[in-house]
Image (cartoon, rainbow, N blue to C red):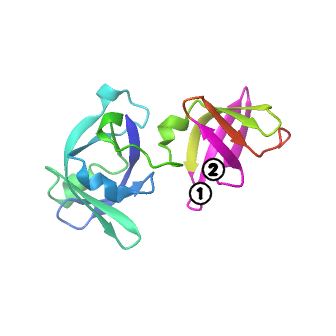
Amino acid sequence: MIVLGRIVAPFGVQGWLRVHPFGDDPEAWRKMPQWWLSADVDAPDEGWKACGLEAVKIHGDGVVAKLAGIDDRDASEALGNCYFGAPREALPAPAPGEYYWNDLIGLAVVNMQDQLLGRVKSLIETGANEVLVVVDGERERLLPFVEHVVKAVDVPGGTIRADWDSDW
């Protein structure tokens, strides 16, 4: 399951939900017939429940969505803090230079001197940019996922090349 975002709060009284997307293009979700929901972001695929997607809208600086069968505020409140996602085959291919976070998890991170810094454990959304959580044994590094730090991403090859000193 590719996690697309998190339900933040109810929006209005007709079952709409305010959502926090983990990607840059929530408008693309309009074409999806359903989302899969789980309270546990790490749940196995069978732990996610399919729910029909009726609408997705940009509202101000946020995103709101309407799910089938969620028709009032009480029903939408019950979904607070659930994650939503979709199987890879239900998603469009990412544009060149863009990646699903799930594709980056587990990649080896090497610096410009070919020193292994560790493997991507997770990503953090900071508002300004995403941050790679890179773990090597017990050491954890936080690398900004920005162009002047991340120089190349090779998903098929399993590596990310970063301009980052091994002592940092």
SS for callout 1 = loop
Residue at the image position 44 percent from the left and 32 percent from the top: 42
Tell me if mark 2 has few (under 14), some (14-19) or many (20+) residues whose alpha carbon lies within 10 angstroms of its own.
Answer: some
Residue 72 at x, y = what percent? 16, 59
Is residue 19 positioned above or below 84 on the image? below
Mark 2–mark 1 distance (CA, rounded to whole Å): 7 Å
Residue 18 at x, y = what percent? 33, 61
Q: Does the stretch in magenta take in 53?
A: no
SS for callout 2 = loop
Front residue of 26/138: it is 26
Residue 20 at x, y = what percent? 41, 56
Residue with the mark numbered 1: 129
Residue at the image position 22 percent from the left and 38 percent from the top: 50
Front residue of 140/34: it is 34
Q: Residue furthest right?
A: 167
Query: Split into 4 quadrants, where in the image is the N terminus?
Result: top left
Q: Amino acid at mark 2?
A: Phe
Task: Write down the region rendered in magenta.
Answer: 125-154
Q: Residue furthest bottom?
A: 60
Is residue 26 positioned above or below 154 on the image? below
Please state if 92 lies on the left or on the right of 106 as rendered: left
Residue 3 at x, y = what percent? 40, 41
Front residue of 167/151: it is 151
Decide whether the magenta segment is chiefly helix, strand or loop: strand
Residue with the mark numbered 2: 145
Residue 120, image quadrant = top right
Answer yes or no: do the residues labelled 2 and 1 have beta carbons within 8 Å? yes
Q: Does the stretch in magenta take in 137?
A: yes
Is residue 128 positioned above or below 118 on the image? below
Q: Amino acid at mark 1?
A: Asn
